[in-house]
């Protein structure tokens, strides 16, 4: 069977009865083409199945209408939801998204920043876990970059922050208001580090205890390096086996909370009667657990909207209206407590 010949712009011009230049003008959305001519060209494109060479078009126009998104782990509900919202916001602005997950490794995060993929995109939305301000010299890039997160505090790029500290502070404070006096937190890292969100969420927990006049008991700060369901269950099992019996539990994400709640149920510990539980992320699954999970909603839709907005401003040569005196934006997206059955008041 003969291989089908690739349809060219010349083929379209012949079918429409116009010049190649006219076809080029239509493909590149030039304004000054009569509607009747434009319609003839578009009809010929449809009939022949002509595909625009986007690489060549992008080289001529100087941009690709493609933005990059780098997240550590697309399997986690937090990052999966963030990615979906970024795609939605980008699509509304006529942009496409290329994913380049970092895998949660410092060198991989640096590789993402300097990857050849960056040459295909107009800019990058970057959510790192391991890089921090000490890596500033290795982070310099010559394309628009928006950073999501608190620990990479560089004042030379636009940044969008979630309320990690405030969110956990509010959840812990709410448990105290509900009568909890011995509150544990699940998800602490065992070494001094600025890795990810853990130190910021731990800070919020400690501050809530201090503001309420409750002691900070290190035994109630339960480690869980990986934030998945099995790690939450294992952390609670260790806690209970060590004789630690809190009346409130703050988990650093919803996956940890799911595992924690399962282990509590296995041990015959009732939620919320014996222990009240809060998660973080307000993932869709949290609403369908039994009991349903109270959680901190970080408002990822707004995080995505602001990230895409700031990036598009930079791509289009504008200084964002959110920029501070240094010329760069630092936007803090407020969180919200979503109270459900796992933290219900005592009757």
Image (spheres, helix red, strand yellow):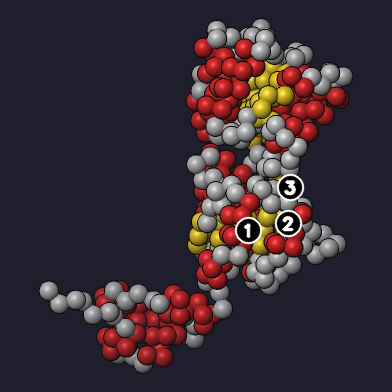
Q: Which residue is mark 2?
A: 135
Q: Nearer the viewer, residue 323 or 347?
A: 323
Q: Residue at x 54, y 17 (%)?
A: 263
Cβ atoms under marks 1 and 2 closer than 8 Å: yes
Residue 278 coordinates in the image, percent (x, y):
65, 24
- Disc on res. 33: none
Residue 134 coordinates in the image, percent (x, y):
77, 54
Q: Residue at x 53, y 52 (%)?
A: 101
- Say if 26 sits above or below 132 in the image: below
Q: Is residue 320 visible?
A: no
Cβ atoms under marks 3 and 2 closer than 8 Å: no
Work out whether mark 1 precedes mark 2 in sequence or the reverse, and give the earlier one. 1
Q: Which residue is mark 1?
A: 110
Q: Quadrant of the C terminus?
A: top right
Q: Residue at x 75, y 37 (%)?
A: 192
Q: Is residue 78 visible?
A: yes
User: What is the spatial separation of the Cα atoms under label 1 and label 2, in whole angstroms?
Assistant: 9 Å
Q: Residue at x 58, y 59 (%)?
A: 112
User: What is the spatial separation of the Cα atoms under label 3 and label 2, in whole angstroms?
Assistant: 11 Å
Q: Quadrant of residue 338?
A: top right
Q: Nearer the viewer, residue 314 or 2?
A: 2
- Say if 122 sits above or below 257 in the image: below
User: What element does badge 2 sit on?
Assistant: helix
Residue 131 coordinates in the image, percent (x, y):
69, 51
User: What element does badge 3 sit on?
Assistant: loop
Q: Residues within 10 Å of mark 3 (few under 14, many from 20)?
A: many
Residue 188 coordinates in the image, percent (x, y):
69, 30
- Disc on res. 151: 3
In the visual, does 171 lie left or right of 125?
right
Q: Residues within 10 Å of mark 1 (few under 14, many from 20)?
A: some
User: What is the spatial separation of the Cα atoms under label 3 and label 1, in whole angstroms?
Assistant: 15 Å
In the visual, does 305 lie left or right of 137?
left
């Amino acid at each position: 069977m003969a291989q089908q010949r690739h349809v060219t712009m010349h083929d379209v011009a012949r079918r429409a009865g116009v010049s190649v230049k006219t076809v080029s003008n239509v493909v590149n959305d030039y304004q000054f083409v009569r509607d009747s001519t434009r319609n003839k060209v578009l009809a010929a494109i449809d009939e022949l199945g002509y595909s625009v060479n986007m690489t060549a078009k992008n080289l001529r126009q100087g941009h690709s209408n493609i933005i990059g998104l780098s997240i550590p782990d697309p399997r986690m509900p937090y990052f999966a939801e963030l990615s979906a919202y970024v795609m939605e916001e980008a699509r509304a602005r006529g942009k496409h998204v290329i994913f380049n997950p970092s895998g949660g490794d410092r060198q991989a995060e640096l590789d993402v920043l300097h990857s050849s993929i960056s040459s295909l995109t107009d800019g990058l939305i970057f959510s790192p876990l391991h890089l921090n301000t000490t890596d500033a010299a290795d982070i310099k890039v010559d394309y628009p970059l928006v950073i999501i997160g608190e620990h990479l505090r560089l004042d030379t790029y636009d940044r969008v922050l979630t309320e990690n500290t405030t969110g956990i502070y509010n959840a812990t404070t709410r448990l105290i208001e509900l009568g909890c006096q011995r509150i544990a937190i699940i998800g602490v890292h065992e070494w001094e580090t600025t890795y990810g969100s853990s130190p910021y969420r731990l800070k919020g927990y400690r501050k809530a205890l201090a503001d309420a006049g409750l002691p900070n008991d290190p035994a109630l700060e339960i480690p869980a390096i990986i934030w998945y369901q099995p790690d939450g269950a294992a952390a609670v099992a260790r806690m209970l086996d060590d004789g630690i019996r809190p009346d409130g539990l703050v988990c650093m994400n919803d996956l940890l909370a799911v595992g924690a709640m399962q282990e509590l149920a296995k041990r015959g510990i009732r939620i919320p009667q014996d222990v009240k539980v809060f998660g973080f992320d307000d993932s869709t699954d949290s609403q369908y657990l039994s009991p349903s999970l109270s959680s901190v909603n970080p408002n990822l839709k707004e995080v995505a909207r602001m990230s895409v907005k700031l990036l598009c401003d930079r791509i289009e040569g504008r200084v964002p209206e959110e920029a501070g005196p240094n010329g760069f934006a630092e936007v803090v997206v407020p969180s919200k407590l979503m109270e459900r059955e796992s933290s219900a008041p005592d009757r």
